[in-house]
Image: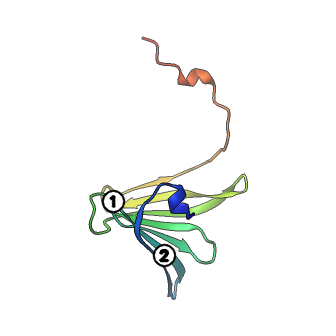
Amino acid sequence: MSLFDQLGFELLSTFVIWVSSFSGSWFVLEATPAHGSVHRLTFDTKTGLLIRETYSIKGGELDHEMQYDDYKEVDGVRVPFTFRSSGGENWTVRLKEVKNNTPIDDAKFDPPSE
């Protein structure tokens, strides 16, 4: 059973290509779900890290892109600290700190008092 099957995706097609240029090389995974639009994931061949995600919000052409950058190790896992979105609303998020499994006081989930 493939990862896509385990996640509940019914795919019309998938393919992986290898792209190389003077600035580096990448693996590109493109998947077309039975219901939805094409989704393209680009991975750096040296690190294996996801660097770009391209997709369509409304179906049709790939018109949105999310870039992942500035990976840092957090508790043994490499996490992107910079996220850039383009194609619709353009924005950038830069994380200062990531903490895993930090205790949260149950009171934070109480409904607000009136």
The amino acid type of the residue labelled 2 equals Val
Query: Residue 96: x percent and y percent?
Result: 58, 49
Q: From the top left corner, tell me how far across and down residue 75 is, in percent.
A: 72, 52
Circle number at residue 9:
none
Horizontally, residue 56 falls left or right of residue 28, namely: left
Local secondary structure at mark 1:
loop
Image vertical order of residue 110 relative to residue 100, above or below: above
Name the residue beneath numbered marker 2: 28
Quarter containing the C terminus: top left
Could you say which is closer to the camera, residue 60 or residue 66? 60
Q: Is residue 10 left or right of residue 78?
A: left
Residue in the image at 62% along x and 47% along y: 98
Q: Residue at x 54, y 56 (%)?
A: 6
Above or below — where is 36 with respect to 62?
above
Where residue 18 appears, as percent x and y from the top left, is 51, 83
Which of 96/114 is in front? 114
Q: Which residue is disc 1 drawn over?
A: 36
Furthest toward the right, the residue is 76
